[in-house]
Amino acid sequence: MDDVLYTGGCLCGALRYAARGRPLFMGHCYCADCRKASGSGFIPFMAFAARDLTFSAPTRTFTCISARGSNAVRNSCPTCASLVFGGPVGETDSHTIYAGSLDDPTAFHPTVAIFAKDRPDWAVIPEGLKVFEGLPD
């Protein structure tokens, strides 16, 4: 494993994370849930194996049904309500870190766009991303 360290957290600093190693993938999600959760046209995300992540504090969670029909869990800071990462802690093998929460935003290099079929016309997909209409296989 490459010894790369990604750090980040919420707006107020109460919820922090550290991710070691290379992300499984990086991209933009254009699904309706991500658009509504972010208040934007997409959520920029980085996926990491759960074993490669540590979190500094408990989170406020919100659960809804995902595109796969399973639960989708979003984790926010209980103090400032910043959206920080996805996935139930201790119950999944991976998490999605929301790239806007990175300490160093230049570390984010997206390669995929998912749920492009749900994208509003004004949410532009950057050139060079591999585009998937839904979830990749």
Image (cartoon, rainbow, N blue to C red):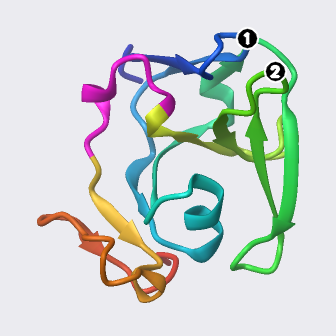
Q: Is residue 73 above or below residue 79?
A: below
The type of residue carrying mark 2 is Thr
* In the image, residue 106 lies in the stretch drawn in magenta: yes
Which residue lies at the image location 44% right of the left edge and 38% below the top edge?
99
Which residue lies at the image location 29% right of the left edge and 50% below the top edge?
110
**Relative to 10, 62 lies left or right:** right
State how far apart marks 1 and 2 are (Cα).
7 Å
Tell me the number on the disc at residue 14. 1
Counting from the top left corner in percent of width and height, residue 88 is at: 83, 44
Which residue lies at the image location 87% right of the left edge and 35% below the top edge?
60
Tell me the number on the disc at residue 79. 2
Please identify the quadrant where the N terminus is shown: top left
The type of residue carrying mark 1 is Ala
Q: Nearer the viewer, residue 35 or 5?
A: 35
Residue 64 occupies quadrant: bottom right
* In the image, residue 69 lies in the stretch drawn in magenta: no
Front position among marks 1 and 2: 2
Which residue lies at the image location 60% right of the left edge and 25% below the top edge?
52
Counting from the top left corner in percent of width and height, residue 96 is at: 59, 45
Q: Nearer the viewer, residue 44 or 69?
A: 44
Q: Residue furthest left?
A: 127
Q: Is residue 136 above or below residue 42?
A: below
Magenta segment range? 101-109
Q: Nearer the viewer, residue 104 or 55?
A: 104
